[in-house]
Amino acid sequence: MSNNKYIFITTPIYYVNAKPHIGHAYTTVVCDVYARFCHMMGYNVKFSTGTDEHGKKVEQSAKKNNRTPQQFADEVSALFKNLLPILNITNDDFIRTTEFRHKKTVEHFWKKLYDAGYIYLGEYKGWYDIQNEAYFTEKELVDGKSPLGGNVVYMEEPCYFFKLSAFGDRLLAYYEEHPDFIFPASRRNEMISFIRQGLTDLAISRTTFSWGIPVPNDPKHVVYVWLDALTNYLTVNGYPTNENQNEDPYWQNVIHFVGKEIVRFHAIYWVAFLMAVGINPPQKIVSHGWWLSEGQKMSKSLGNVQNPYDYCAEFGSDALRYYLLRELTFGSDGNFSRESFINRYNSILANSYGNLCNRVLSFIQKYCNGTIERPVEITDEDEKFYQAIDANINVCPDLIHKFSFNKYLEKMENAITLSNQYIDFQKPWTFKTSDKNRMNTILYVCLENIYKIAIMLSPVIPSTAEKLMKILKLKPTFTFDGNNRLPNTVELNELEILFPKH
Ligand code: MSP
Protein backbone atom coordinates (compact mmCIF):
# COMPACT_ATOMS: atom_id res chain seq x y z
CA MET A 1 0.00 0.00 0.00
CA SER A 2 1.36 3.38 -0.83
CA ASN A 3 -0.10 5.60 1.89
CA ASN A 4 1.48 6.68 5.14
CA LYS A 5 -1.06 5.26 7.58
CA TYR A 6 0.46 2.48 9.66
CA ILE A 7 -0.76 0.65 12.72
CA PHE A 8 0.62 -2.20 14.82
CA ILE A 9 -2.12 -4.00 16.74
CA THR A 10 -1.30 -6.59 19.40
CA THR A 11 -3.15 -9.07 21.57
CA PRO A 12 -1.52 -10.03 24.86
CA ILE A 13 0.35 -13.30 24.44
CA TYR A 14 -1.53 -16.08 26.18
CA TYR A 15 -0.19 -18.23 29.00
CA VAL A 16 0.10 -21.82 27.96
CA ASN A 17 -0.92 -23.22 31.32
CA ALA A 18 -4.61 -23.29 30.36
CA LYS A 19 -6.56 -24.10 27.23
CA PRO A 20 -8.11 -21.22 25.31
CA HIS A 21 -11.60 -20.19 26.46
CA ILE A 22 -14.06 -17.46 25.56
CA GLY A 23 -12.09 -14.79 27.50
CA HIS A 24 -9.00 -15.37 25.36
CA ALA A 25 -11.10 -15.56 22.22
CA TYR A 26 -12.58 -12.18 23.14
CA THR A 27 -9.26 -10.30 23.26
CA THR A 28 -8.25 -11.85 19.95
CA VAL A 29 -11.58 -11.15 18.24
CA VAL A 30 -11.62 -7.53 19.39
CA CYS A 31 -8.13 -7.04 17.92
CA ASP A 32 -9.15 -8.74 14.70
CA VAL A 33 -12.22 -6.56 14.30
CA TYR A 34 -10.09 -3.49 14.89
CA ALA A 35 -7.42 -4.74 12.47
CA ARG A 36 -9.97 -5.49 9.74
CA PHE A 37 -11.54 -2.08 10.30
CA CYS A 38 -8.13 -0.38 9.95
CA HIS A 39 -7.49 -2.32 6.73
CA MET A 40 -10.81 -1.12 5.43
CA MET A 41 -9.86 2.48 6.26
CA GLY A 42 -6.66 2.13 4.22
CA TYR A 43 -4.09 1.49 6.95
CA ASN A 44 -1.04 -0.73 6.56
CA VAL A 45 -1.75 -3.10 9.43
CA LYS A 46 0.55 -5.36 11.38
CA PHE A 47 -1.38 -7.58 13.76
CA SER A 48 0.26 -10.02 16.13
CA THR A 49 -0.75 -12.57 18.71
CA GLY A 50 0.98 -15.55 20.31
CA THR A 51 1.81 -17.45 23.46
CA ASP A 52 3.68 -16.67 26.68
CA GLU A 53 5.48 -19.89 27.52
CA HIS A 54 8.04 -19.39 30.27
CA GLY A 55 7.75 -19.13 34.04
CA LYS A 56 7.17 -21.19 37.11
CA LYS A 57 3.51 -21.72 36.43
CA VAL A 58 4.19 -23.40 33.10
CA GLU A 59 7.00 -25.45 34.62
CA GLN A 60 4.58 -26.68 37.30
CA SER A 61 1.72 -27.40 34.90
CA ALA A 62 4.09 -29.37 32.65
CA LYS A 63 5.20 -31.48 35.58
CA LYS A 64 1.62 -32.21 36.59
CA ASN A 65 0.95 -33.37 33.04
CA ASN A 66 4.10 -35.51 32.85
CA ARG A 67 5.61 -33.39 30.12
CA THR A 68 8.78 -31.39 29.76
CA PRO A 69 8.02 -27.66 29.80
CA GLN A 70 8.85 -27.48 26.09
CA GLN A 71 6.55 -30.38 25.18
CA PHE A 72 3.80 -28.92 27.27
CA ALA A 73 4.25 -25.45 25.76
CA ASP A 74 4.24 -26.93 22.25
CA GLU A 75 0.96 -28.70 22.87
CA VAL A 76 -0.93 -25.80 24.44
CA SER A 77 0.52 -23.18 22.11
CA ALA A 78 -0.81 -25.27 19.19
CA LEU A 79 -4.31 -25.06 20.70
CA PHE A 80 -4.12 -21.26 20.70
CA LYS A 81 -2.71 -21.19 17.19
CA ASN A 82 -5.30 -23.62 15.82
CA LEU A 83 -8.11 -21.55 17.25
CA LEU A 84 -7.16 -18.57 15.08
CA PRO A 85 -8.46 -19.85 11.72
CA ILE A 86 -11.56 -21.16 13.51
CA LEU A 87 -12.29 -17.62 14.73
CA ASN A 88 -11.31 -16.23 11.29
CA ILE A 89 -8.44 -14.14 12.66
CA THR A 90 -6.19 -12.23 10.24
CA ASN A 91 -3.01 -12.03 12.35
CA ASP A 92 0.26 -11.46 10.51
CA ASP A 93 2.42 -13.10 13.13
CA PHE A 94 2.13 -15.67 15.89
CA ILE A 95 4.95 -15.25 18.36
CA ARG A 96 6.05 -17.90 20.86
CA THR A 97 8.38 -16.78 23.61
CA THR A 98 10.31 -20.05 23.28
CA GLU A 99 11.36 -19.16 19.73
CA PHE A 100 14.99 -18.40 18.98
CA ARG A 101 14.19 -14.99 17.47
CA HIS A 102 12.55 -13.96 20.73
CA LYS A 103 15.41 -15.18 22.90
CA LYS A 104 17.77 -13.00 20.84
CA THR A 105 15.51 -9.98 21.28
CA VAL A 106 15.20 -10.44 25.04
CA GLU A 107 18.97 -10.85 25.43
CA HIS A 108 19.62 -7.72 23.43
CA PHE A 109 16.96 -5.74 25.27
CA TRP A 110 18.33 -6.86 28.64
CA LYS A 111 21.85 -5.75 27.63
CA LYS A 112 20.51 -2.38 26.55
CA LEU A 113 18.75 -1.91 29.89
CA TYR A 114 21.91 -2.99 31.68
CA ASP A 115 24.21 -0.72 29.63
CA ALA A 116 21.87 2.19 30.24
CA GLY A 117 22.45 1.69 33.98
CA TYR A 118 18.92 0.64 34.93
CA ILE A 119 19.68 -2.91 36.14
CA TYR A 120 21.46 -3.83 39.38
CA LEU A 121 21.93 -7.02 41.40
CA GLY A 122 20.16 -7.19 44.77
CA GLU A 123 18.16 -9.53 47.00
CA TYR A 124 14.43 -10.05 46.80
CA LYS A 125 12.23 -10.80 49.77
CA GLY A 126 8.51 -10.83 49.30
CA TRP A 127 5.27 -12.62 48.53
CA TYR A 128 5.15 -14.28 45.16
CA ASP A 129 1.88 -14.93 43.31
CA ILE A 130 2.74 -17.89 41.10
CA GLN A 131 -0.50 -17.82 39.19
CA ASN A 132 0.07 -14.25 38.09
CA GLU A 133 3.88 -14.35 38.14
CA ALA A 134 4.26 -11.24 40.27
CA TYR A 135 5.77 -10.25 43.60
CA PHE A 136 3.88 -8.28 46.24
CA THR A 137 4.78 -6.67 49.52
CA GLU A 138 3.06 -7.68 52.75
CA LYS A 139 1.12 -4.41 52.61
CA GLU A 140 -0.30 -5.18 49.20
CA LEU A 141 -1.81 -8.56 50.15
CA VAL A 142 -5.58 -8.80 50.45
CA ASP A 143 -6.85 -11.39 52.94
CA GLY A 144 -3.62 -13.33 52.63
CA LYS A 145 -3.84 -13.43 48.84
CA SER A 146 -2.26 -11.30 46.16
CA PRO A 147 -4.28 -8.28 44.98
CA LEU A 148 -4.74 -10.24 41.72
CA GLY A 149 -6.42 -13.03 43.69
CA GLY A 150 -3.66 -15.66 43.48
CA ASN A 151 -2.18 -17.66 46.36
CA VAL A 152 1.16 -16.32 47.53
CA VAL A 153 4.34 -17.87 48.94
CA TYR A 154 7.10 -16.06 50.82
CA MET A 155 10.36 -16.11 48.87
CA GLU A 156 13.87 -14.77 49.22
CA GLU A 157 16.22 -14.85 46.29
CA PRO A 158 19.15 -12.91 44.85
CA CYS A 159 17.85 -11.13 41.85
CA TYR A 160 18.37 -8.37 39.37
CA PHE A 161 16.28 -5.27 39.77
CA PHE A 162 15.08 -2.73 37.26
CA LYS A 163 15.16 0.85 38.58
CA LEU A 164 11.45 1.40 38.15
CA SER A 165 11.51 3.92 40.98
CA ALA A 166 13.31 6.35 38.66
CA PHE A 167 10.37 6.50 36.24
CA GLY A 168 7.42 7.77 38.27
CA ASP A 169 7.62 11.37 37.12
CA ARG A 170 8.40 10.48 33.55
CA LEU A 171 5.42 8.15 33.41
CA LEU A 172 3.09 10.76 34.87
CA ALA A 173 4.41 13.34 32.41
CA TYR A 174 3.85 10.91 29.55
CA TYR A 175 0.24 10.30 30.61
CA GLU A 176 -0.28 14.03 30.94
CA GLU A 177 1.05 14.71 27.45
CA HIS A 178 -0.97 11.82 26.00
CA PRO A 179 -4.35 12.03 27.69
CA ASP A 180 -5.77 9.19 25.56
CA PHE A 181 -2.89 6.86 26.19
CA ILE A 182 -4.86 4.52 28.46
CA PHE A 183 -8.42 3.54 27.66
CA PRO A 184 -10.78 3.74 29.46
CA ALA A 185 -10.09 6.81 31.60
CA SER A 186 -10.93 4.90 34.80
CA ARG A 187 -7.90 2.64 34.24
CA ARG A 188 -5.76 5.67 33.51
CA ASN A 189 -6.75 7.10 36.86
CA GLU A 190 -5.91 3.81 38.57
CA MET A 191 -2.44 3.88 37.03
CA ILE A 192 -1.90 7.48 38.07
CA SER A 193 -2.79 6.79 41.68
CA PHE A 194 -0.64 3.64 41.68
CA ILE A 195 2.35 5.66 40.49
CA ARG A 196 1.66 8.48 42.93
CA GLN A 197 1.90 6.02 45.82
CA GLY A 198 5.54 5.60 44.81
CA LEU A 199 7.07 2.99 42.52
CA THR A 200 9.52 0.49 43.93
CA ASP A 201 12.24 -1.19 41.88
CA LEU A 202 11.11 -4.27 40.03
CA ALA A 203 12.60 -7.76 40.43
CA ILE A 204 13.38 -8.85 36.88
CA SER A 205 15.18 -12.16 37.32
CA ARG A 206 14.51 -15.44 39.12
CA THR A 207 16.76 -18.19 40.42
CA THR A 208 14.17 -20.54 41.98
CA PHE A 209 13.32 -22.24 38.70
CA SER A 210 14.96 -22.59 35.31
CA TRP A 211 12.18 -22.49 32.71
CA GLY A 212 12.98 -19.14 31.16
CA ILE A 213 15.50 -17.20 29.13
CA PRO A 214 18.88 -17.15 30.93
CA VAL A 215 20.09 -13.72 31.98
CA PRO A 216 22.99 -12.66 29.74
CA ASN A 217 26.31 -13.27 31.54
CA ASP A 218 24.61 -14.75 34.62
CA PRO A 219 22.75 -17.91 33.58
CA LYS A 220 21.85 -18.93 37.15
CA HIS A 221 19.09 -16.38 36.70
CA VAL A 222 16.24 -16.51 34.23
CA VAL A 223 14.57 -13.34 32.96
CA TYR A 224 11.34 -12.44 34.78
CA VAL A 225 8.47 -13.72 32.71
CA TRP A 226 6.79 -10.33 32.30
CA LEU A 227 9.94 -8.67 30.98
CA ASP A 228 10.33 -11.66 28.66
CA ALA A 229 6.66 -11.52 27.58
CA LEU A 230 6.36 -7.77 27.04
CA THR A 231 9.42 -7.83 24.81
CA ASN A 232 7.44 -9.99 22.34
CA TYR A 233 6.11 -6.79 20.80
CA LEU A 234 9.65 -5.78 19.82
CA THR A 235 10.46 -9.26 18.53
CA VAL A 236 7.44 -9.09 16.25
CA ASN A 237 8.55 -5.71 15.00
CA GLY A 238 11.97 -7.03 13.99
CA TYR A 239 14.07 -5.77 16.93
CA PRO A 240 17.06 -5.82 17.26
CA THR A 241 17.80 -6.36 13.53
CA ASN A 242 15.53 -3.39 13.07
CA GLU A 243 17.13 -1.60 16.02
CA ASN A 244 15.96 1.93 15.37
CA GLN A 245 12.33 1.36 16.27
CA ASN A 246 11.66 5.07 16.57
CA GLU A 247 12.07 5.33 12.80
CA ASP A 248 9.92 2.31 12.05
CA PRO A 249 6.52 3.30 10.64
CA TYR A 250 4.61 0.62 12.58
CA TRP A 251 6.27 1.62 15.86
CA GLN A 252 4.84 5.13 15.46
CA ASN A 253 1.37 3.75 16.05
CA VAL A 254 1.34 0.77 18.39
CA ILE A 255 -1.90 -0.21 20.07
CA HIS A 256 -1.86 -2.89 22.75
CA PHE A 257 -5.23 -4.44 23.57
CA VAL A 258 -5.19 -6.00 27.04
CA GLY A 259 -7.53 -7.28 29.72
CA LYS A 260 -8.08 -4.94 32.66
CA GLU A 261 -5.91 -6.99 35.04
CA ILE A 262 -2.76 -6.53 32.95
CA VAL A 263 -2.94 -2.80 32.27
CA ARG A 264 -0.30 -2.14 34.94
CA PHE A 265 2.25 -4.35 33.24
CA HIS A 266 1.77 -2.51 29.96
CA ALA A 267 1.14 1.05 31.07
CA ILE A 268 3.84 1.17 33.74
CA TYR A 269 6.49 -1.56 33.44
CA TRP A 270 6.55 -1.78 29.66
CA VAL A 271 6.58 1.97 29.15
CA ALA A 272 9.39 2.37 31.71
CA PHE A 273 11.47 -0.40 30.08
CA LEU A 274 11.10 1.30 26.71
CA MET A 275 11.90 4.72 28.12
CA ALA A 276 15.01 3.26 29.74
CA VAL A 277 16.45 2.20 26.37
CA GLY A 278 15.18 5.25 24.47
CA ILE A 279 12.46 3.51 22.46
CA ASN A 280 9.21 5.44 22.14
CA PRO A 281 6.32 4.07 24.21
CA PRO A 282 3.24 2.67 22.46
CA GLN A 283 0.48 4.99 21.33
CA LYS A 284 -2.32 3.32 23.26
CA ILE A 285 -3.10 0.75 25.89
CA VAL A 286 -6.70 -0.28 25.43
CA SER A 287 -8.21 -2.40 28.12
CA HIS A 288 -11.34 -4.50 28.20
CA GLY A 289 -13.36 -6.06 30.98
CA TRP A 290 -13.95 -9.65 31.92
CA TRP A 291 -16.45 -12.19 30.79
CA LEU A 292 -18.29 -14.03 33.49
CA SER A 293 -20.03 -17.22 32.54
CA GLU A 294 -23.66 -17.70 33.54
CA GLY A 295 -23.05 -15.01 36.18
CA GLN A 296 -19.83 -16.40 37.69
CA LYS A 297 -16.11 -16.31 37.11
CA MET A 298 -15.20 -19.06 34.64
CA SER A 299 -13.45 -21.95 36.31
CA LYS A 300 -12.85 -25.61 35.65
CA SER A 301 -14.16 -26.57 39.07
CA LEU A 302 -17.48 -24.77 38.51
CA GLY A 303 -17.67 -26.42 35.09
CA ASN A 304 -18.78 -23.17 33.48
CA VAL A 305 -15.86 -22.56 31.12
CA GLN A 306 -17.31 -21.38 27.82
CA ASN A 307 -15.55 -22.95 24.90
CA PRO A 308 -15.14 -20.95 21.68
CA TYR A 309 -14.73 -24.10 19.53
CA ASP A 310 -18.22 -25.33 20.40
CA TYR A 311 -19.91 -22.03 19.56
CA CYS A 312 -18.05 -21.76 16.25
CA ALA A 313 -18.97 -25.34 15.35
CA GLU A 314 -22.62 -24.86 16.20
CA PHE A 315 -23.28 -21.31 15.00
CA GLY A 316 -20.27 -20.28 12.90
CA SER A 317 -17.46 -17.89 13.82
CA ASP A 318 -19.40 -14.81 12.67
CA ALA A 319 -22.12 -15.50 15.20
CA LEU A 320 -19.60 -15.77 18.04
CA ARG A 321 -17.73 -12.65 16.91
CA TYR A 322 -20.98 -10.70 16.72
CA TYR A 323 -22.12 -11.80 20.15
CA LEU A 324 -18.78 -11.03 21.82
CA LEU A 325 -18.76 -7.47 20.52
CA ARG A 326 -22.47 -6.79 20.88
CA GLU A 327 -23.16 -8.18 24.33
CA LEU A 328 -20.40 -6.51 26.32
CA THR A 329 -19.83 -2.79 26.68
CA PHE A 330 -16.14 -2.59 25.85
CA GLY A 331 -14.18 -1.83 29.01
CA SER A 332 -16.82 -3.24 31.40
CA ASP A 333 -17.45 -6.79 32.59
CA GLY A 334 -20.25 -8.81 31.08
CA ASN A 335 -22.00 -12.11 31.25
CA PHE A 336 -21.74 -14.86 28.65
CA SER A 337 -24.74 -17.11 28.55
CA ARG A 338 -25.89 -19.60 25.97
CA GLU A 339 -29.42 -18.33 26.27
CA SER A 340 -28.57 -14.72 25.46
CA PHE A 341 -26.27 -15.95 22.69
CA ILE A 342 -29.13 -17.83 21.02
CA ASN A 343 -31.51 -14.91 21.55
CA ARG A 344 -29.19 -12.44 19.88
CA TYR A 345 -28.36 -14.88 17.13
CA ASN A 346 -31.99 -15.50 16.24
CA SER A 347 -33.35 -12.01 16.70
CA ILE A 348 -30.56 -10.07 15.00
CA LEU A 349 -28.57 -12.30 12.71
CA ALA A 350 -31.19 -14.80 11.55
CA ASN A 351 -34.51 -12.93 11.74
CA SER A 352 -33.43 -9.38 11.09
CA TYR A 353 -30.25 -9.31 8.98
CA GLY A 354 -30.44 -12.79 7.40
CA ASN A 355 -34.09 -12.34 6.62
CA LEU A 356 -33.53 -8.92 5.05
CA CYS A 357 -30.86 -10.29 2.70
CA ASN A 358 -32.84 -13.38 1.95
CA ARG A 359 -36.09 -11.65 1.10
CA VAL A 360 -34.47 -9.08 -1.22
CA LEU A 361 -32.14 -11.52 -2.94
CA SER A 362 -34.73 -14.23 -3.48
CA PHE A 363 -37.16 -11.66 -4.81
CA ILE A 364 -34.57 -10.49 -7.36
CA GLN A 365 -33.78 -14.09 -8.25
CA LYS A 366 -37.38 -15.02 -8.73
CA TYR A 367 -38.94 -11.97 -10.31
CA CYS A 368 -36.02 -10.22 -12.06
CA ASN A 369 -34.20 -13.31 -13.41
CA GLY A 370 -31.42 -12.61 -10.96
CA THR A 371 -30.38 -9.33 -12.59
CA ILE A 372 -31.03 -5.79 -11.51
CA GLU A 373 -30.09 -2.37 -12.89
CA ARG A 374 -29.35 0.96 -11.22
CA PRO A 375 -32.57 3.04 -11.53
CA VAL A 376 -32.45 6.26 -13.57
CA GLU A 377 -34.66 8.04 -11.08
CA ILE A 378 -35.49 7.50 -7.44
CA THR A 379 -38.27 8.97 -5.30
CA ASP A 380 -37.90 11.27 -2.29
CA GLU A 381 -38.70 8.32 -0.06
CA ASP A 382 -35.91 6.29 -1.61
CA GLU A 383 -33.56 9.21 -1.12
CA LYS A 384 -34.61 9.55 2.52
CA PHE A 385 -33.99 5.88 3.02
CA TYR A 386 -30.45 6.23 1.63
CA GLN A 387 -29.84 9.17 3.95
CA ALA A 388 -31.14 7.33 6.99
CA ILE A 389 -28.86 4.36 6.29
CA ASP A 390 -25.86 6.62 5.66
CA ALA A 391 -26.54 8.49 8.90
CA ASN A 392 -26.21 5.21 10.79
CA ILE A 393 -23.23 3.95 8.84
CA ASN A 394 -21.19 7.14 8.82
CA VAL A 395 -20.96 7.41 12.60
CA CYS A 396 -19.54 3.88 12.86
CA PRO A 397 -15.88 4.67 12.09
CA ASP A 398 -15.83 7.14 14.95
CA LEU A 399 -17.52 4.68 17.32
CA ILE A 400 -15.02 1.97 16.40
CA HIS A 401 -12.12 4.38 16.90
CA LYS A 402 -13.55 4.99 20.38
CA PHE A 403 -13.87 1.23 20.97
CA SER A 404 -17.65 1.56 21.36
CA PHE A 405 -18.18 -1.71 19.57
CA ASN A 406 -21.65 -2.38 20.95
CA LYS A 407 -22.88 1.10 19.94
CA TYR A 408 -21.47 0.56 16.46
CA LEU A 409 -23.44 -2.68 16.19
CA GLU A 410 -26.56 -0.97 17.51
CA LYS A 411 -26.25 1.54 14.67
CA MET A 412 -25.97 -1.32 12.22
CA GLU A 413 -29.04 -2.94 13.75
CA ASN A 414 -30.91 0.35 13.26
CA ALA A 415 -29.89 0.32 9.62
CA ILE A 416 -31.12 -3.26 9.22
CA THR A 417 -34.46 -2.44 10.86
CA LEU A 418 -34.87 0.59 8.60
CA SER A 419 -34.21 -1.58 5.57
CA ASN A 420 -36.80 -4.16 6.59
CA GLN A 421 -39.28 -1.32 7.19
CA TYR A 422 -38.52 0.17 3.79
CA ILE A 423 -39.41 -3.11 2.08
CA ASP A 424 -42.54 -3.59 4.19
CA PHE A 425 -43.65 -0.09 3.34
CA GLN A 426 -42.67 -0.04 -0.36
CA LYS A 427 -44.11 -3.50 -0.98
CA PRO A 428 -42.17 -4.37 -4.16
CA TRP A 429 -44.37 -7.48 -4.62
CA THR A 430 -47.38 -5.27 -5.44
CA PHE A 431 -45.55 -4.04 -8.59
CA LYS A 432 -44.72 -7.46 -9.99
CA THR A 433 -46.95 -6.98 -13.01
CA SER A 434 -48.21 -3.41 -12.75
CA ASP A 435 -44.88 -1.48 -12.63
CA LYS A 436 -41.74 -3.52 -13.11
CA ASN A 437 -39.70 -0.36 -13.22
CA ARG A 438 -40.73 0.67 -9.71
CA MET A 439 -40.18 -2.87 -8.46
CA ASN A 440 -36.64 -2.78 -9.87
CA THR A 441 -35.99 0.59 -8.22
CA ILE A 442 -37.12 -0.55 -4.78
CA LEU A 443 -35.05 -3.72 -5.00
CA TYR A 444 -31.94 -1.96 -6.26
CA VAL A 445 -32.15 0.75 -3.61
CA CYS A 446 -32.57 -1.85 -0.92
CA LEU A 447 -29.80 -4.06 -2.28
CA GLU A 448 -27.41 -1.14 -2.42
CA ASN A 449 -28.06 -0.40 1.23
CA ILE A 450 -27.66 -4.06 2.14
CA TYR A 451 -24.32 -3.90 0.36
CA LYS A 452 -23.24 -0.83 2.35
CA ILE A 453 -24.33 -2.45 5.60
CA ALA A 454 -22.39 -5.60 4.71
CA ILE A 455 -19.23 -3.57 4.17
CA MET A 456 -19.54 -1.75 7.47
CA LEU A 457 -20.30 -5.04 9.24
CA SER A 458 -17.51 -6.95 7.48
CA PRO A 459 -14.94 -6.51 10.29
CA VAL A 460 -17.30 -8.35 12.66
CA ILE A 461 -18.94 -10.88 10.33
CA PRO A 462 -16.33 -11.34 7.60
CA SER A 463 -17.49 -14.77 6.36
CA THR A 464 -21.05 -13.60 5.88
CA ALA A 465 -19.91 -10.41 4.16
CA GLU A 466 -17.79 -12.53 1.82
CA LYS A 467 -20.70 -14.88 1.11
CA LEU A 468 -22.82 -11.89 0.23
CA MET A 469 -20.14 -10.52 -2.10
CA LYS A 470 -20.02 -13.92 -3.79
CA ILE A 471 -23.78 -13.83 -4.32
CA LEU A 472 -23.41 -10.32 -5.80
CA LYS A 473 -20.43 -11.48 -7.94
CA LEU A 474 -18.22 -8.84 -6.35
CA LYS A 475 -14.68 -9.13 -5.02
CA PRO A 476 -14.54 -9.86 -1.28
CA THR A 477 -12.29 -6.89 -0.57
CA PHE A 478 -13.65 -4.23 1.70
CA THR A 479 -12.76 -0.58 1.61
CA PHE A 480 -14.81 2.19 3.11
CA ASP A 481 -14.92 5.72 1.79
CA GLY A 482 -18.38 6.74 3.01
CA ASN A 483 -19.79 6.28 -0.48
CA ASN A 484 -19.75 2.60 -1.35
CA ARG A 485 -21.85 1.95 -4.46
CA LEU A 486 -23.00 -1.14 -6.27
CA PRO A 487 -22.14 -1.54 -9.97
CA ASN A 488 -24.87 -0.34 -12.34
CA THR A 489 -25.81 -3.88 -13.19
CA VAL A 490 -25.86 -6.59 -10.56
CA GLU A 491 -26.25 -10.18 -11.60
CA LEU A 492 -26.71 -12.68 -8.81
CA ASN A 493 -24.97 -15.97 -8.27
CA GLU A 494 -26.82 -18.79 -6.59
CA LEU A 495 -28.22 -17.84 -3.18
CA GLU A 496 -27.11 -19.21 0.15
CA ILE A 497 -28.77 -19.00 3.54
CA LEU A 498 -26.61 -16.59 5.56
CA PHE A 499 -27.79 -17.38 9.09
CA PRO A 500 -29.90 -20.53 9.55
CA LYS A 501 -32.31 -20.29 12.47
CA HIS A 502 -31.51 -22.12 15.72
N1 MSP B 1 0.60 -13.85 29.49
C1 MSP B 1 -0.04 -12.71 30.01
C2 MSP B 1 -0.01 -11.57 29.04
C3 MSP B 1 1.36 -11.15 28.56
S1 MSP B 1 1.27 -9.87 27.38
C4 MSP B 1 2.80 -9.36 27.19
C5 MSP B 1 -1.50 -13.04 30.34
N2 MSP B 1 -2.00 -14.12 29.76
S2 MSP B 1 -3.50 -14.70 30.01
O1 MSP B 1 -3.59 -15.86 29.18
O2 MSP B 1 -3.72 -14.87 31.40
O3 MSP B 1 -4.49 -13.58 29.57
C6 MSP B 1 -4.47 -13.11 28.27
C7 MSP B 1 -5.66 -12.25 27.97
O4 MSP B 1 -6.87 -12.98 28.08
C8 MSP B 1 -5.77 -11.06 28.91
O5 MSP B 1 -6.01 -9.88 28.16
C9 MSP B 1 -6.96 -11.41 29.76
O6 MSP B 1 -7.65 -10.29 30.22
C10 MSP B 1 -7.80 -12.20 28.79
N3 MSP B 1 -8.77 -13.00 29.51
C11 MSP B 1 -8.57 -14.16 30.19
N4 MSP B 1 -9.74 -14.50 30.80
C12 MSP B 1 -10.69 -13.56 30.55
C13 MSP B 1 -12.07 -13.46 30.76
N5 MSP B 1 -12.74 -14.32 31.48
N6 MSP B 1 -12.72 -12.44 30.13
C14 MSP B 1 -12.10 -11.58 29.28
N7 MSP B 1 -10.81 -11.67 29.06
C15 MSP B 1 -10.01 -12.45 29.91
O7 MSP B 1 -2.10 -12.31 31.10
Image (spheres, helix red, strand yellow):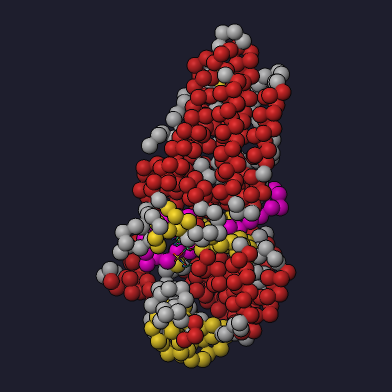
Residue drawn where x is 33% and y is 74% of the image: 60
Horizontal side of residue 321 vs 184, given as left or right: left
Residue 370, image x and y in percent?
A: 53, 19
Kindly indicate the quadrant of the structure image that contains residue 427.
Answer: top right
Would residue 235 be visible to someone looking at this image? no
Looking at the image, residue 177 lies above or below residue 322: below
Residue drawn where x is 65% and y is 46% of the image: 397
18 in the magenta segment: yes
Looking at the image, residue 386 lies above or below residue 283: above
Is 170 or 38 nearer to us in this picture? 170
Would residue 468 be visible to someone looking at this image? yes
Residue drawn where x is 36% and y is 69% of the image: 70
Is 30 or 475 nearer to us in this picture? 30
Horizontal side of residue 128 vs 92, given as left or right: left
446 in the magenta segment: no
Residue drawn where x is 53% and y is 24% of the image: 360
Count of marks placed on residues: 0
Kindly indicate the quadrant of the structure image that contains residue 456.
Answer: top right
Horizontal side of residue 335 vs 47, given as left or right: left
Magenta span of residues:
1-26
Residue 454, image x and y in percent?
A: 57, 36
Looking at the image, residue 90 lies above or below residue 373: below
Residue 444, image x and y in percent?
A: 61, 23
Question: Which image quadrant: the C terminus?
Answer: top left
| Furthest residue in direction left, as rendered | 66
Looking at the image, residue 428 lies above or below residue 496: above
